[in-house]
Image (tube, rainbow, N blue to C red):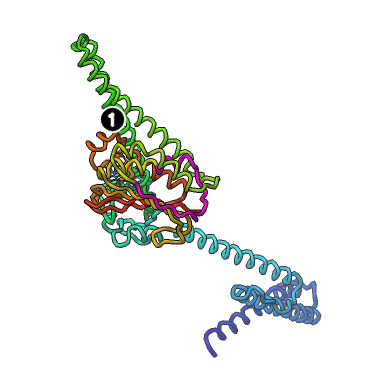
Amino acid sequence: MNDRQSRAGAAAIASFLALAAMPSLVFGVLIAVHDLSVRPGLRAWAACTIAACCAGLLLGRDIGVMTALIRGLAANPAARPARLMVPGMASLGREARHLLRAERLGRTRLANSAAEDRALVERLPDPLIKLDGAGNPVWRNASAAAIFGAETAALLRHPDLRAALAQAQAGGAPVRQGITTAAPVLRDLDATIIPVGGPVYLLLTDRTRERALEKMRADFVANSSHELRTPLASLIGFIETLRGPAADDPEAQQRFLTIMSEQAGRMQRVIADLLSLSRIEISEHQPPQDRLALPPLLARLIAGMEPMLTAADTRIDVTIDETLPEIPADADQLAQLFTNLFDNAIKYGKRGGRIKLHARASTGDDRFAGGGVLVSVIDDGPGIPREHIPRLTERFYRVDKGRSRAVGGTGLGLAIVKHIVNRHRGRLLIESTEAAGTNFTVWLPN
Ligand code: ADP
């Protein structure tokens, strides 16, 4: 006999004695006070004791069934109990089943919600890192792994971040701190440190693009003011001179007025280009709807360039594929785009040189996304050094400031070209060979 069986046997004997105790006590007292004679009293005692024991046995069996049921339900919620004998036990069984089902459902819901929370945190676009009380990383989401990779440890050593971590842990409240990291690339980050009892969560928001845009905007305002301030200062200076020292010098007056007219013209061009740029930017998110055939537009523009070409002693070779497909385009904006490219080719090309204009259908060139038209404006000028090419479409970026000003440039022509190309969902490719020339190719999809 094992331990469990002997314990069950002892419990059964104890239950039997407990069940027999009450009728024994009652009948013992009744017989002792002569309310009941001994023989019938013993018979009644025996009957009651047997009845109590039978009831006890049935109850014990049902309790056993219920215990097995509850244990079984935890593993198999569909388990059905064996038949219960004692009235009322069946409803107790039902209640137990409901209770267990509700508890099981609650646990499943809790597990699902925890899994959802984990998936959400894992897929957060911002990097999230969990640190233990000592500041060591114990977990990070996919974005943190992708952005910081092996550099997480270096990031966590950032002195400003460490100070903010200590502050958050000491105060028990979230702390925000801006940090700039040099590796793996230069980044401006907003770190939010959230202490949650022992561990600490570190949420990083990348502000690099935003800060770069803010800087670009500030630079743009500064550059625009500078572009206008210089000719304006010159105009004011000449006005003073005309009023004072040159008041009676008609020859100097003529000379100064010529310069003043040039300066005013420069201001006018800068303002016109700034206005164009802002108008194009406003419409940039809406691709043009009208369909346009390019050949007549290009022919009209080339005819309009004649005086400039003659003045620069430059020839133009035109090859326009007559089967060019029509494209969705804003005619005014494309006129401005190609005028800027012809203008540059004439301005920066070789004097007495040759410009080529090629317009052909594109059926999916490796460098471009697909079908449409490709227009190349090629000059045989001095070319552009390689390091300048990626920056040419920045506002006010010039390779040679003096030359640009001397030929009446505003530094905005290619920025305008880029925005027009963007609005048309096209692409601009600049290829240049020093001392050989430059090729500006525009791809516009159909
Ligand atoms: P800009 O008004 O100064 O011409 P752009 O934005 O049109 O301004 O051009 C930016 C700079 O790119 C110019 O200042 C010039 O240095 C260079 N550039 C543009 N087109 C050419 C070209 N065809 N050949 C050589 N350099 C060019």
Please tell me in which quarter of the rendered image ligand 1 is found: top left
- What amino acid does circle 1 point to? His
Query: Closer to the camera, 306 or 369?
Result: 306
Q: Is residue 220 above or below residue 205?
A: above
Q: Position of residue 238 (x, y in %)?
A: 24, 18
Which quarter shows the N terminus?
Answer: bottom right
Question: Where does the magenta region start and end?
Answer: 316-338
Is 318 one of the magenta-colored residues?
Answer: yes
Residue 200 seen in render:
yes
- Provide the residue designation for mark 1: 226
* Tally of numbered tags: 1
Q: Is residue 87 above or below residue 233?
A: below
> Is 367 rendered above or below residue 11?
above
Between 55 and 322, which is closer to the camera in this rendering?
322
Which residue is the extreme one toward the left? 245
Q: Residue at x 25, y 48 (%)?
A: 384
Closer to the camera, 210 or 233?
Answer: 233
Which SS class for mark 1?
A: helix
Q: At 71% from the left edge and 69% from the top edge, which residue is drawn?
A: 94
Position of residue 77 in the picture relative to residue 224 (left or right): right
Crowding at mark 1 (Cα within 10 Å: few <14, some 14-19, many 20+): few
> Which x, y percent locates residue 377?
36, 49
